[in-house]
Image: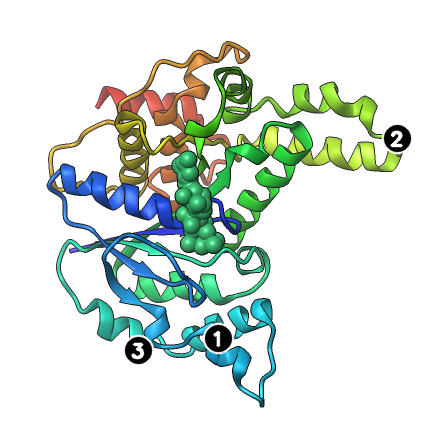
Amino acid sequence: MPRFAQLVMGPAGSGKSTYCSTMVQHLGTLNRSAQVVNLDPAAEHFDYPVMADIRELIQVDDVMEDPSLRFGPNGGLVFCMEYFANNFDWLDESLGHVEDDYILFDCPGQIELYTHLPVMKQLVEQLQQREFRVCGVFLVDSQFMVESFKFISGVMAALSAMVLLEIPQINIMTKMDLLSPKAKKEIEKYLDPDMYAMMEDNSDNIRSKKFQSLTKAICGLIDDYSMVRFMPFDRTDEEGVNMVLQNIDFSIQYGEDLEFKEPKVKKQTNTTKPNRKRSDANYYAFIIHVWFLQEVDDDSGDLNYDEAFQDKVDS
Ligand SMILES: Nc1nc2c(ncn2[C@@H]2O[C@H](COP(=O)(O)OP(=O)(O)OP(=O)(O)O)[C@@H](O)[C@H]2O)c(=O)[nH]1
Ligand SMILES: [Mg+2]
């Protein structure tokens, strides 16, 4: 029997702990049991009940106070995570083995963990060895995403995690409830972004020709492979929270032994993309599923996602 995990990641303050608390409450209202593991050794506040807390294993303050280590807060946190990676037995003891586990891991906000350090990858491998199907949930604060260049940085951070971890990943824009109606309208274009158009809008702001071509190449790569999209997350909107959950469940095939339920699709008001099917959340989750679980053989190199998606929907 597989077990299921959400690895909740994202920059500092992006809303990871709040997401875990909202999601676990939402799962409760659906009569689904889910647990949260705190993996942030520097955590001070969270309001969900924890199944396990990394601070029982190691705390940043202890590392910083240790005269033989003398780390600051950032180095201390990296040290703690490396210590954790070498002591996965602690996680085994804490998790036990209940069939049909559904666990959310509230991760630290140090961006290095998702760009080049191996510890998160090691965690994923350890979980997979223990029969977990893991979905990465990458959170970015919508407050910082209302301008194109900030948005490109956010996309690159999400992309780094996707490439590093090699698991299905759902990217989420948090704190949507804080946006004004005008900003909400504005941000819609970032949920399913047309990177080429974004680049064109801003190319006048870049003076250096070399930098302009580099930015163009990055935007082109992201757009050509439809690599990164975002789902909005407003903790006060239950329907929206449910839609995020359904997409995550779909990407790890939670409940495949149960009756198959397709994620609900909220009506899109974004009209910038002519191909409606490509901006469909189901389609997005489906591509992730195909890529990572390799359900469709793409050796031929000319796999048609549109056709494969239609087949799946028809069946
Ligand atoms: N209004 C609103 N505030 C939010 C939301 N999510 C998080 N916040 C606030 O943003 C702040 C940071 O949220 P956290 O959930 O602690 O963020 P985090 O990513 O866990 O932070 P670190 O663990 O320090 O990296 C807190 O004050 C939260 O109350 C949201 O969806 N809406
Ligand atoms: Mg936190």
Quadrant placement of the N terminus: bottom left
| Picture residue at 48% right of the left edge, 67% below the top | 119
Q: Quadrant of residue 23?
A: top left
Q: Is residue 50 left or right of residue 201?
A: left
Which residue was labeled with disc 1? 61
Q: Is residue 165 left or right of residue 247?
A: right
Q: Quadrant of residue 268?
A: top left
Amino acid beneath label 3: Asp
CB-based contact (under 8 Å), mark 3 and mark 1: no
Quadrant placement of the C terminus: top left
Amino acid beneath label 2: Arg
Which residue was labeled with disc 2? 207
- Which of the two discs, 1 and 2, sits closer to the camera? 1
The disc placed on residue 173 is none
| Picture residue at 38% right of the left edge, 63% below the top | 39
Which residue was labeled with disc 3? 89
